[in-house]
Image (spheres, rainbow, N blue to C red):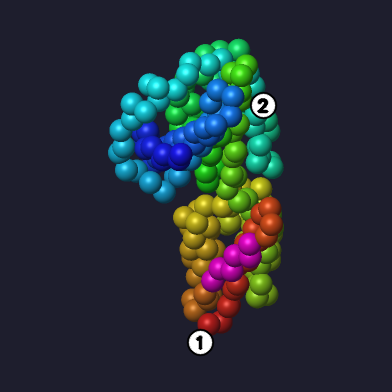
């Protein structure tokens, strides 16, 4: 039997708990899933369905899915601890803190009820980063000067507003240098782990 329950949302993230109860084995066994999305700001309320779940000790906390964010930097924001009582509200707050770091697109939490207690697993999905910045078409102005105007750097998290701001700054820089018809457009190439940002410059646009 599967039941999806909305628990709560904080700021720009919504937390969902899905409870799966498997019957027919010795005792009862269930798995839970929490998902947080930075795109949602819907207010939801906690369900009393968890009042019927057994109170258990957390036997392990597992983090996976992180590629560039260090494990220690994630763990210090998680208050669910091995050896402590399993607490749904604490898990909610853990998800909230991770989303508010701004480095994850999504955080899912899976819990597995064992005879000894609960195993809690946080599956994090990192936002892509800028792996490479390139310029095409700049003949009259050097790449070094353009880099000074460009405020986004390799290794930064992808931020569309910041990238567009750099495009505008570079275009304005060309105008100040006398290239009154110059235009700058953007190409973003998505990679497996990071993205390439290309500024395409037409110094004498028609």
Quadrant of residue 57 in the image?
top right
Q: Does the magenta portion include 136? A: no
x and y, in percent, of residue 132 in the image: 69, 58
Residues at discs 1 and 2 in contact (Cβ within 8 Å):
no
58 relative to 44, above or below: above
Residue at (53, 26) in percent of width and height: 28
Q: Name the residue under label 1.
A: 206
150 relative to 38, above or below: below
Among all residues in the image, which is located at the extreme bottom? 206
Residue at (65, 41) in percent of width and height: 65
Front-most of 20 and 68?
20
Report the mark closest to the observer, 1 or 2: 2
Whether residue 185 sits left or right of residue 136 in the image: it is left
What kind of element bears circle 1?
A: loop
- Residue density around tag 1, few if under 14, some if 14–19, many if 20 or more, within 10 Å: few
Q: Name the residue under label 2.
A: 72
Q: Return the mark for residue 194.
A: none
x and y, in percent, of residue 193 in the image: 68, 53
Residue at (51, 87) in percent of width and height: 206
**Which region is colored magenta?**
185-190
CA distance separating discs 1 and 2: 53 Å
Q: Which secondary structure type mostly characterizes the magenta part of the structure?
A: strand
Identify the mark nearer the N-term, 1 or 2: 2
5 relative to 60, above or below: below
Front-most of 120 and 2?
2
Does the rendering let one see residue 13? no
Q: Does the magenta portion include 189? A: yes
Quadrant of residue 89 in the image?
top left
x and y, in percent, of residue 93 in the image: 45, 26
Residue at (59, 44) in percent of width and height: 125
What kind of element bears circle 2?
A: helix
């Amino acid at each position: 039997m599967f039941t999806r329950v909305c628990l709560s949302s904080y700021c720009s993230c919504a937390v969902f708990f899905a409870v799966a109860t498997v019957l027919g084995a010795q005792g009862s066994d269930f798995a839970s899933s929490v998902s947080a999305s930075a795109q949602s700001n819907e207010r939801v309320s906690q369900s009393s369905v968890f009042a019927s779940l057994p109170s258990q000790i957390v036997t392990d906390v597992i983090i996976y899915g992180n590629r560039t964010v260090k494990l220690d930097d994630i763990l210090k924001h998680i208050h669910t601890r091995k050896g402590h009582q399993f607490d749904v509200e604490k898990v909610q707050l853990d998800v909230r803190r991770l989303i508010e770091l701004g480095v994850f697109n999504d955080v899912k939490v899976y819990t597995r009820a064992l005879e000894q207690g609960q195993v809690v697993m946080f599956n994090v999905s990192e936002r892509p980063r800028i792996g490479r910045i390139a310029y095409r078409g700049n003949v009259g102005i050097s790449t070094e000067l353009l880099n000074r105007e460009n405020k986004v750097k390799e290794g930064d998290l992808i931020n569309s507003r910041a990238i567009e701001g750099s495009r505008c700054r570079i275009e304005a820089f060309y105008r100040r240098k006398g290239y009154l018809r110059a235009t700058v457009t953007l190409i973003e190439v998505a990679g497996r782990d990071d993205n390439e940002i290309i500024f395409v410059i037409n110094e004498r646009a028609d």
